[in-house]
Amino acid sequence: MKNLASVIVIGGLALTGCATTSPLLSVPAVSMTNPSFPPDYKPTNLGPVNSKYCYGEEASTKHGDTVGLMDEVTMKAQHEKNATYISDAHYSYEGASCITLEGTAMK
């Protein structure tokens, strides 16, 4: 019985470890499609966005053999909302190999 309790506790800790989220980076604005905007650009708020990209998923920004997880989650967030960029972007590392992005989609 004592061994069973130990296995349950260790298993629970392992599962909790996989579900942790650690902040990585926060930026005022990010875009995978537009390097800059004219000074008179008037953005439209498209609402909140929360995207997740995990290593091994099909890449949409792949160039050669290099795929950046932050690049992929940014592109995924832009595609989900048909956004030009993401403002107030907060990246987090989730679990063993996933990146999440929370922010505001803008067009």
Image (cartoon, rainbow, N blue to C red):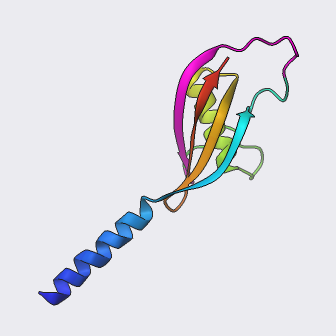
| Pick the front one: 90 or 7 | 90
Range of residues picked out in magenta: 37-56
Q: Position of residue 26 (x, y in %)?
A: 67, 44
Check if residue 14 falls in the magenta segment. no
Q: Residue at x 17, y 82 (%)?
A: 4
Looking at the image, which residue sits at the far right? 39
Q: Residue at x 58, y 18 (%)?
A: 46
Tell me: 20 left or right of 22. Answer: left
State the residue at coordinates (76%, 28%).
Answer: 33
On the picture, is 64 further left or further right than 76?
A: right
Residue 54 falls within the magenta-colored stretch: yes
Where 50 falls versus 9 (above or below)?
above
Residue for point 30% across, 73% down: 11
Where residue 14 appears, as percent x and y from the top left, is: 37, 71
Quarter holding residue 74: top right
- Quadrant of image for the C terminus: top right
